[in-house]
């Protein structure tokens, strides 16, 4: 599928075209993550775009208008692509550019492809309408739909030779995924309620008198919605702090990518913390210029200042 030019493996023209398709999907649809992905050198950027385009397809099936049975069939058909990738059966002239790009990415990078099966498993939980009693239960879902993306991304980034704690890198990448997903759940609490979904743990909702849900644009009488949001924000911040321990293990541009992706979501969390009821009124978002600013800070290492001392420890 690729040819060797001056010792460098270059994707063939059809594979390049497949990557261009995935990069276009990423540019158009990854409203928050595209800023970080753009900071990567070509090969890693293309690989992240292939992962994004595959994940977007899975998510879109889950969020789309099909009946649950049809969603399951479509998700299993998408899972079959992973089987073909593993078996080396995706040809570069395959009609599905996402499959072509993913197959090339899997050859170039040690990505744990099973993470994409986990993503499909997570979206199937959505299709079944599962709800979560406790944070431990919700964590299982978050690991599937976001932790797995962190672990796959780590396969693209790699860790620096001799990086301290490198044996914990996958754990931290997973935890950063959880931080992002919990932030995403808080941000989308109203939209999800409109689609009949509640992700926040039932025991947290009960503790703050919010078991009636979030279908209105003001909290229901007697509910301590602010208390609930602040509680979940604290949980997300702890996950960010733990997940950021990944950063010192990455090369500069991979670290910048992660800092930008996480930085945008951390700022969303800041906004949500300042005005919890905003998530009931609409979707909290950052202006494009602020996302670009976060990306520039990521590139200059400025957004890693809060990484704990222990995490930036280097081997002697
Ligand atoms: C190590 C590392 C890179 C960790 C992070 C892993 C990661 C990117 C997880 C994605 C989780 C998430 C909130 C997806 C929503 O995507 P979306 O496209 O629906 O987001 P949007 O609604 O904000 O646009």
Image (cartoon, helix red, strand yellow):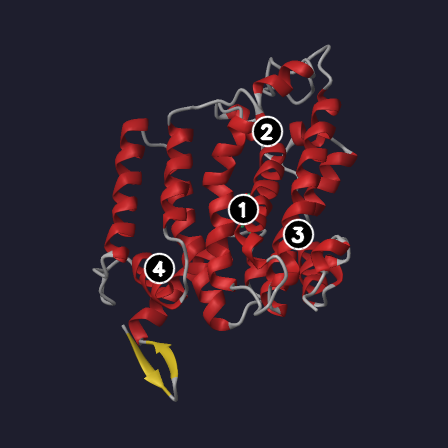
Q: Do the residues labelled 3 and 4 touch (CB within 8 Å)?
A: no
Q: How crowded is mark 4: few (under 14 residues within 10 Å), some or many (20 or more)?
A: many
Against 157, residue 75 (above or below) is above
Residue pointed to by mark 1: 174
Q: From mark 3 to mark 4, how far is it between C-alphas?
A: 27 Å
- As drawn, the label of residue 201 is none
- Can you give x and y, in whole percent of width and height, for residue 260 in the image? 64, 57
Q: Which of 245 and 313 is in front in this view?
A: 313
- Can you give x and y, in whole percent of width and height, for residue 63 in the image? 42, 35
Q: Quadrant of the C terminus?
A: bottom right
Name the residue: 56% across, 22% down. 134
Beta carbon of the mark 4 residue lies under 8 A of ligand 1:
no
Q: From mark 4 to mark 2, how far is it between C-alphas?
A: 32 Å
For the question of whether residue 64 can be seen, the reply is: no
Q: Relative to 133, is 273 on the left or the right?
A: right
For the question of whether residue 115 can be seen, the reply is: yes
Q: Relative to 252, is 5 on the left or the right?
A: left
Dot 3 or dot 2: first in sequence order is 2
Quarter where residue 225 is shown: top right
For discs 4 and 2, the disc positioned in front in the rendered view? 4
- As drawn, the label of residue 244 is 3
- As drawn, the label of residue 102 is 4
Residue pointed to by mark 2: 189
Q: From mark 1 to mark 2, how far is it between C-alphas?
A: 22 Å
Dot 4 or dot 2: first in sequence order is 4
For discs 3 and 2, the disc positioned in front in the rendered view? 3
Q: Residues within 10 Å of mark 2 (few under 14, many from 20)?
A: many
């Amino acid at each position: 599928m690729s040819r060797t030019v001056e010792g460098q493996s270059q994707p063939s023209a059809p594979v390049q075209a497949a990557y261009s398709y995935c990069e276009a999907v990423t540019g158009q649809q990854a409203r928050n993550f595209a800023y970080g992905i753009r900071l990567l050198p070509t090969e890693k950027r293309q690989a992240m775009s292939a992962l994004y385009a595959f994940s977007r397809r899975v998510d879109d099936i889950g969020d789309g208008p099909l009946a649950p049975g049809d969603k399951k069939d479509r998700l299993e058909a998408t899972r079959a692509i992973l089987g073909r990738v593993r078996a080396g059966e995706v040809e570069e002239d395959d009609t599905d550019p996402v499959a072509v790009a993913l197959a090339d990415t899997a050859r170039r990078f040690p990505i744990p492809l099973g993470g994409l099966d986990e993503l499909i498993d997570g979206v199937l939980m959505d299709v079944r309408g599962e709800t979560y009693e406790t944070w431990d239960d919700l964590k299982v879902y978050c690991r599937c739909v976001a932790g797995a993306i962190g672990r796959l991304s780590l396969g693209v980034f790699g860790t620096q030779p001799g990086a301290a704690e490198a044996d914990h890198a996958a754990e931290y990448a997973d935890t950063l995924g959880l931080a992002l997903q919990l932030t995403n759940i808080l941000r989308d609490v109203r939209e999800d309620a409109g689609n009949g979904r509640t992700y926040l743990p039932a025991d947290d909702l009960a503790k703050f008198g919010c078991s009636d849900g979030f279908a209105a644009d003001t909290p229901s009488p007697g509910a301590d919605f602010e208390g609930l949001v602040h509680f979940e924000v604290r949980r997300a911040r702890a996950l960010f702090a733990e997940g950021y321990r990944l950063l010192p293990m990455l090369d500069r541009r991979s670290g910048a990518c992660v800092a930008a992706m996480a930085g945008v979501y951390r700022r969303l969390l800041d906004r949500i913390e300042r005005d919890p009821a905003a998530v009931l009124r609409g979707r909290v978002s950052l202006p494009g210029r602020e996302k670009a600013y976060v990306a520039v800070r990521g590139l200059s290492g400025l957004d890693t200042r809060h990484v704990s001392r222990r995490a930036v420890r280097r081997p002697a």
